[in-house]
Image: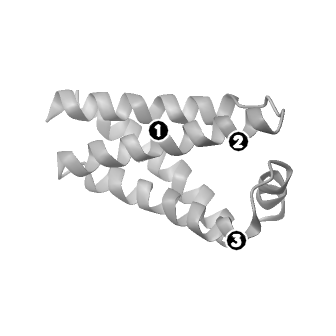
């Protein structure tokens, strides 16, 4: 179970780190997507920080199980919020948020069972 957690945690951390970097640097495509969803510009640094913290927590979770579980739950909640934001904006292109959210749930379950 730990190896499965490690694989999911590393892949998810890579995706979150990339997204956090693009958000911090205000990549036009990513920022445009946030704007279409009605996300205020002032929220972008906080959202990027949340993604970076989730990535770091998942990797720390390789050594400290409780941090990995907490980070995975936080990431799952982040992507649940993303799905809600998409639905509220009548944008139903939610597959990436759903997949990443389910990966976070899987990471939480795997880390709990491998602790």
Callout 1 crowding tier (Cα within 10 Å): few <14, some 14–19, many ≥20:
many
62 horizontally vs 45: left or right: left
Depth check, mark 2 against mark 1: the one in front is 2
Could you say which is closer to the camera, residue 68 or residue 70? 70
| Marks 2/1: CA–CA distance | 14 Å
Depth check, mark 1 against mark 3: the one in front is 3
**Residue at the disc numbered 2:** 85
Position of the C terminus by quadrant = top left
**Residue at the disc numbered 1:** 76
Secondary structure type for disc 3: helix
What is the x, y in percent for residue 52? Answer: 48, 62
Mark 2 or mark 1: whose residue is earlier in sequence: 1
At x 52% / y 34%, what residue is drawn?
Answer: 101
Residue 42, disc: 3
Mark 1 or mark 3: whose residue is earlier in sequence: 3
Instruction: Tell me if residue 12 comes above or below residue 112 in the rendering.
Output: below
28 horizontally vs 86: left or right: right
| Marks 3/2: CA–CA distance | 16 Å
Residue 111, disc: none
């Amino acid at each position: 179970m730990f190896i499965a957690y490690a694989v999911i945690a590393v892949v998810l951390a890579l995706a979150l780190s990339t997204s956090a970097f693009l958000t911090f640097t205000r990549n036009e495509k990513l920022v445009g997507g946030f704007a279409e969803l009605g996300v205020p510009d002032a929220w972008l640094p906080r959202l990027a920080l949340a993604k970076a913290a989730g990535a770091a927590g998942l990797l720390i979770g390789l050594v400290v199980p409780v941090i990995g579980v907490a980070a995975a739950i936080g990431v799952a909640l982040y992507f649940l919020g993303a799905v809600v934001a998409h639905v509220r904006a009548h944008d139903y292109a939610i597959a990436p948020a759903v997949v990443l959210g389910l990966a976070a749930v899987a990471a939480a379950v795997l880390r709990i069972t491998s602790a």
